[in-house]
Image: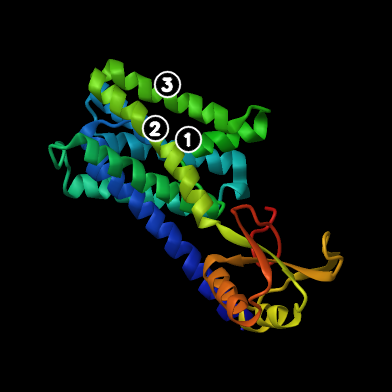
């Protein structure tokens, strides 16, 4: 049974990694390369260099990622293996293959704002999926891993600063409009990614005040397959004894519990709070 669960978990994990990689490939191939959008990272550098030395951006992207992969293997060892390697190889080779089979040299529409939206949203969601699974897309993430290992530098700040420099370079290498689009895309990607990460992890935290906690706890245990915490309390005005039930649930489970309490214990007092940082058994681990 454990082996079967491990196989299912493996398939789900690498299925999500594949979907995230495909989102990154499509956003770069369809929208970033044709419009010269540079949001930072290896993709941004390859777009800038492609204009300067007239080598396809996908080729430069492949070469730089291979170099970084080798450095990652040599310096980081096992820390680097697994998910990051899979995503990096899939996204890099896949992008090069698409660009070789059917290169897109001109924007696919005459609406750069719409293309910018897709160029921002697709990789932002993909990055959120990868981050949520403790994986990365390689590229400058490998540089971040190296900085984390050998320096005390704040990694997020350092990478964001580098990305801004790459985006600003679009003003010089291309034109003012492309530079503005690139900067706008960088900031929008950061905001969308933060929002996507929060929504992927969003849970509902229930604080339930009731005089009859048993049916509520039974429903939580037997129907929702979760546990809960109960402690005694006293009403400040009535001085009657109360029970407070604390439980954290996924959103679909929260809907079921709220409906159950409304039908079975309508006098219960509920406070429901959103939380995206739940760490512990049944949710996210510390690592």
Q: Position of residue 25 (x, y in %)?
A: 32, 48
Label 1: element kind: helix
Q: Quadrant of residue 212?
A: bottom right
Q: Residue furthest front?
A: 238
| Residues at marks 2 and 3 touching, judged by CB atoms closer than 8 Å | no
Label 3: element kind: helix
Disc 3: CA contacts within 10 A as few (<14), some (14-19) or many (>=20): some
Q: Position of residue 94 (x, y in %)?
A: 31, 51
Q: Residue at x 35, y 29 (%)?
A: 184
**13 horizontally vs 167: left or right:** right
Could you tell me how far apart the alpha carbons at marks 1 and 2 are, in whole angstroms? 15 Å
Q: Position of residue 263 (x, y in %)?
A: 58, 81
Q: Residue at x 23, y 40 (%)?
A: 115
Could you tell me how far apart the alpha carbons at marks 2 and 3 are, in whole angstroms? 11 Å
Q: Earlier in the sequence, mark 2 or mark 3?
A: 3
**250 horizontally vs 163: left or right:** right
Mark whose residue sits in front, 2 or 3: 2
- Label 1, on which residue? 140
Q: Is residue 85 visible?
A: no
Badge number at residue 186: 2
Residue nearest the observer in this picture, 107 or 95 = 107
| Residues at marks 1 and 2 touching, judged by CB atoms closer than 8 Å | no
Mark whose residue sits in front, 1 or 2: 2
Q: Residue at x 87, y 65 (%)?
A: 239
Could you tell me how far apart the alpha carbons at marks 3 and 1 are, in whole angstroms? 13 Å
Label 2: element kind: helix
- Label 3, on which residue? 165
Q: Is residue 167 visible?
A: yes
**184 horizontally vs 53: left or right:** right
């Amino acid at each position: 049974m454990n082996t079967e669960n491990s196989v299912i978990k493996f398939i789900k994990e690498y299925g999500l990694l594949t979907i995230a990689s495909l989102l990154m490939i499509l956003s770069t191939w369809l929208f970033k390369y044709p419009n010269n959008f540079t949001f930072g990272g290896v993709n941004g550098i390859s777009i800038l260099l492609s204009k300067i030395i007239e080598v396809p951006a996908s080729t430069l992207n492949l070469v730089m990622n291979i170099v970084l992969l080798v450095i990652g293997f040599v310096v980081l060892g096992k820390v680097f293996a697994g998910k990051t390697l899979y995503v990096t190889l899939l996204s890099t080779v896949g992008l090069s293959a698409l660009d070789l089979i059917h290169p897109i040299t001109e924007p696919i529409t005459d609406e750069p704002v719409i293309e910018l939206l897709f160029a921002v949203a697709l990789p932002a969601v993909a990055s959120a999926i990868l981050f949520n699974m403790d994986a990365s897309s390689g590229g400058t993430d490998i540089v971040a891993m190296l900085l984390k290992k050998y320096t005390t530098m704040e990694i997020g700040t350092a990478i964001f600063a580098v990305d801004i420099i790459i985006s600003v370079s679009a003003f010089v290498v291309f034109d003012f409009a492309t530079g503005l689009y690139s900067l706008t895309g960088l900031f929008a990607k950061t905001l969308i990614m933060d929002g996507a990460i929060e929504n992927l992890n969003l849970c509902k935290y229930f604080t339930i005040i009731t005089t009859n906690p048993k049916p509520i706890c039974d429903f939580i245990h037997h129907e929702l397959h979760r546990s809960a915490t109960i402690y005694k309390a006293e009403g400040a005005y009535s001085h009657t004894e109360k029970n407070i039930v604390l439980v954290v649930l996924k959103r679909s489970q929260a809907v079921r519990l709220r409906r159950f309490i409304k039908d079975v214990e309508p006098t219960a007092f509920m406070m429901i709070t959103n939380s995206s940082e739940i760490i512990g058994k049944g949710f996210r681990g510390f690592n």
